[in-house]
Image (cartoon, rainbow, N blue to C red):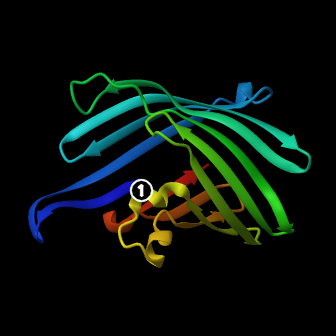
């Protein structure tokens, strides 16, 4: 994920500018699929000259509530190998409950996520809509209660903050490429690209 060029400025005078980005390599632990989905990963992150890396573990249990797909997951549980600073920190784990494939029709569905982040005081609510156009393309749009922390104008623009848009491209070889964009209001936009092989 590339957070782009960040600028430290006062009255439009740029004092400092730097890039920020993260790389994640994740391996799915298929031998545990009988019980739950799990993966282990390595993440490298850099903000200006500050660098950090960690080993992370994710676990997810999927189940059904009537006809709706549901899941409960624990993400980013692990250890930080090198921290940005000398302060000892734990990875910012999160617990997530999801409802997926609430169908409106065959190719269009709604999803809902309730996310608890250990570094936030209140849970995050996310609503999403997705549309399958064909076997090779899926479009997604979502918004979350995170926009409340980005409000500055007290008008319609505040409801666009936290809005994310993305799409998935599928290939004949079961490879998927996800591309997504997130509106962070005054902080700008973030984009991410994921390759699932």
Count of marks, rendered view: 1
Residue 154 spot, x, y in % from top left:
41, 72
Q: Which residue is mark 1?
A: 149
* Residue drawn at x 56%, y 39% as measured from the top left: 116
Q: Is residue 170 left or right of residue 68?
A: left
Q: Residue at x 48, y 65 (%)?
A: 181
Q: Quadrant of residue 110?
A: bottom right
Q: Nearer the viewer, residue 72 or 152?
A: 152
Q: Mark 1: few, some, or many residues within 10 Å (few <14, many ≥20)?
A: few
Q: Residue furthest bottom?
A: 156
Task: Residue 192: tell me if it is visible.
Answer: no
The residue depicted at 65 percent of the width and 55 percent of the height is 175
Please tell me whether residue 150 is drawn above or below residue 96 in the rendered image.
below
The one of 144 and 81 positioned closer to us in this rendering = 144
Q: Residue at x 42, y 30 (%)?
A: 91
Judge whether residue 70 can be spotted in this image: yes
x and y percentages locating residue 193 in the rendered image: 49, 58
Check the image and report above or below for 31 versus 5.
above
Residue 170 falls in image quadrant: bottom right
Along the horizontal axis of the image, is 35 left or right of 122?
Answer: right
């Amino acid at each position: 994920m590339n957070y782009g060029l960040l600028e430290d400025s006062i009255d439009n005078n740029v004092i400092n500018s730097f890039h920020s980005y993260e790389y994640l390599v994740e391996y799915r632990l298929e031998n545990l699929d009988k019980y739950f989905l799990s993966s282990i990963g390595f993440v490298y992150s850099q903000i200006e000259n500050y660098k950090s890396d960690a080993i992370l573990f994710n676990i997810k249990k999927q189940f059904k509530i009537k006809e709706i797909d549901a899941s409960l997951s624990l993400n980013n549980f692990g250890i930080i190998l090198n921290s940005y600073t000398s302060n000892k920190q734990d990875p910012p784990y999160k617990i997530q409950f999801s409802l997926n494939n609430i169908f409106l029709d065959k190719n269009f569905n709604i999803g809902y996520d309730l996310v608890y982040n250990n570094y936030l005081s209140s849970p995050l609510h996310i609503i999403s809509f997705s549309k399958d156009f064909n076997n090779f393309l899926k479009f997604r749009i979502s918004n979350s209660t995170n926009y409340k922390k980005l409000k500055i104008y007290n008008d319609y623009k505040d409801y666009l903050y936290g809005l994310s848009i993305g799409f998935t491209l599928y290939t004949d070889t079961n490879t998927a490429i996800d591309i997504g964009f997130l509106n962070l209001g005054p902080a700008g936009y973030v984009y991410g690209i994921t390759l699932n092989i």
